[in-house]
């Protein structure tokens, strides 16, 4: 099959979160299965060095306004990449925001991106069997494909749409409809995600658990009726883990390699992180966390629970991330209050993310909601027992202790008491060395490869093609 991905980030080129990992992982798995994948991305400022002397110019009309862009093509790991260059819209250091607020012209930027991707597909001289859009940034393409391209060679192509996080919908004022040439539909406001839910042939999200949660409020964030209406075309396909990048036996960022049969390297990784962060080499558990610092990640109950728990435990905690100022300030304050036990690494380093995964005894992932989650998958392979709230993809991938098949620790209620009790439960498990090792080994034996996910996407693609042919 010849598949066109329309996505706003891709690991190895531009990344703000798990969307980039998922797009790359799926594209590589499909390619390994013998299919041809072309990925269309905006050419953000950090990608300008990929410019080539040979490019294709694309011109089109959007709501009576003439637009043009250059499309640069190259190949990476067997996957075709097409970068849409437009200085006004994309020559910015950050894809979606200025660090505090989303860009005010995001509706125009990503409607333009969607239309440019379709125009390029139409005039590139390449043949495609199916278009696969990812998250709200590609959603307008579903609408434009069905409404603006019915008299073109693209008309027969089905559109599959993946929701990586349904909380991000890009709701905007009604006046944007006229500027973007989008007719009124179900809502007076313009909701990009709703566009794709209305016009895509098949829809999926990145775990069965999250798919089921999106059928009801408040998880659906106002779109439950629309998800319910499309329920027959709405699927859950779990994300995979890229074990080429995330495996402690081959991880280039680690000071020592290890695997389930030989764990001594993990102890060296733990010691190295403690040394780097000036934590004592004590015989106590090390809890780590790497995430965006947002309410979605559970910080409203994790922070007060940690504040109380750190007064009674000798355990050490390291959290790395960037995000909302109030959470950054609270984490910095925790380090001041508990300088012997707590470290806040403000920022993001890919190397440190890998090193923390390897160093930890437990990984903190108490998300308020989680479409799939990737860090719990990394943690399982790295022998770092995940502590998760049992929601969405976390519920689908972590089997809570106690139980012989347990792979992590889980709790249900999103509140301070449940979080505090779970931290104590983790300490109890750590004290039972045989039980802890069993949970650790169970986790390291799990396999969430992208090949399994890709096979399910291929079934979805075939269903979309069959429906389009009728």
Image (tube, rainbow, N blue to C red):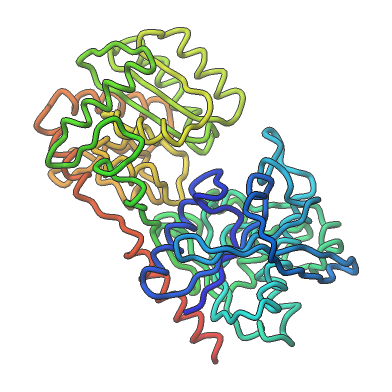
At 45% from the left edge and 66% from the top edge, which residue is drawn?
Answer: 78
In which quadrant of the rendered view does residue 125 lie? bottom right
Q: Residue furthest right?
A: 64
Percent x, y of residue 110: 71, 57
Q: Which picture quadrant has residue 252?
A: top left
- Foreground residue among 435 and 251: 251
Q: Which residue is located at x 33 percent, y 16 percent? A: 275
Number of marks in the rendered image: 0
Is the C terminus in the top left, top right, bottom left or bottom right quadrant?
A: bottom right
The residue at 81%/70% (across/down) is 59
Q: Residue furthest left?
A: 434
Residue 290 % position (x, y): 43, 33
| Residue at horizontal 47 percent and vertical 22 percent from the top | 345
Residue 409 in percent (x, y) is at 27, 37
Left or right side of 116 for 415: left
| Vertical side of 148 occupied by 93: above or below | above
Q: Position of residue 311 (x, y in %)?
A: 35, 9
**Image height of 119 relative to 207, above or below:** below
Q: Residue furthest toward the front?
A: 53
- Horizontally, residue 430 falls left or right of residue 378, namely left
Compared to residue 203, the image places residue 107 above or below, namely above
């Amino acid at each position: 099959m010849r598949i066109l991905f329309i996505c706003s980030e891709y690991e190895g080129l531009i990344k703000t979160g798990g969307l980039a990992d998922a797009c790359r992982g799926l594209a590589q798995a499909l390619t390994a299965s013998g299919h041809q994948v072309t990925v269309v991305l905006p050419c953000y400022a950090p990608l300008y060095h990929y410019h080539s002397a040979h490019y294709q110019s694309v011109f089109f009309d959007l709501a009576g306004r003439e637009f043009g862009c250059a499309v640069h093509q190259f190949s990476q790991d067997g996957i075709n990449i097409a970068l849409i260059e437009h200085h006004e819209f994309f020559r910015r250091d950050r894809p979606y925001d200025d660090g505090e607020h989303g860009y005010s012209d995001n509706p125009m930027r990503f409607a333009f991106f969607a239309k440019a991707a379709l125009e390029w597909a139409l005039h590139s001289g390449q043949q495609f069997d199916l278009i696969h859009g990812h998250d709200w940034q590609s959603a307008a393409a579903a609408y434009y494909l069905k409404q603006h391209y019915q008299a073109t060679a693209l008309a027969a192509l089905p559109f599959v749409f993946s929701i990586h996080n349904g909380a991000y919908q890009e709701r905007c004022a009604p006046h944007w409809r006229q500027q973007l040439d989008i007719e009124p539909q179900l809502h007076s406001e313009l909701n990009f995600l709703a566009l794709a839910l209305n016009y895509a042939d098949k829809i999926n999200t990145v775990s069965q658990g999250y798919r089921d949660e999106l059928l009801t409020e408040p998880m659906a964030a106002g779109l439950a009726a629309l998800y319910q209406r499309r329920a027959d075309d709405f699927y859950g396909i779990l994300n995979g883990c890229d074990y080429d990048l995330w495996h402690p036996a081959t991880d280039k960022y680690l000071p020592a390699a290890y695997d389930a049969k030989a764990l001594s390297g993990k102890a060296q990784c733990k010691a190295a992180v403690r040394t780097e962060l000036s934590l004592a080499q004590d015989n106590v558990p090390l809890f780590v966390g790497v995430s965006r610092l947002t309410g979605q990640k559970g910080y409203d109950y994790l922070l007060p629970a940690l504040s109380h728990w750190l007064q009674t435990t000798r355990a050490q905690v390291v959290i790395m991330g960037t995000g909302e100022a109030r959470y950054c300030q609270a984490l910095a304050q925790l380090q001041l209050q508990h300088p012997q036990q707590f470290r806040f690494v403000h920022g993001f380093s890919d190397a440190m993310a890998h090193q923390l995964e390897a160093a930890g005894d437990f990984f903190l992932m108490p998300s308020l909601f989680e479409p799939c989650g990737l860090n719990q998958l990394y943690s399982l392979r790295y022998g770092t027992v995940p502590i998760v709230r049992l929601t969405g993809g976390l519920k689908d991938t972590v089997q809570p202790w106690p139980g012989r098949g347990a792979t992590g620790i889980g709790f249900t209620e999103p509140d301070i008491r449940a979080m505090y009790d779970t931290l104590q439960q983790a300490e109890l498990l750590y004290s039972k060395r045989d039980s802890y090792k069993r949970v650790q080994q169970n986790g390291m034996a799990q396999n969430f490869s992208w090949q399994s996910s890709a096979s399910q996407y291929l079934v979805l693609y075939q269903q979309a093609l069959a429906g389009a042919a009728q």
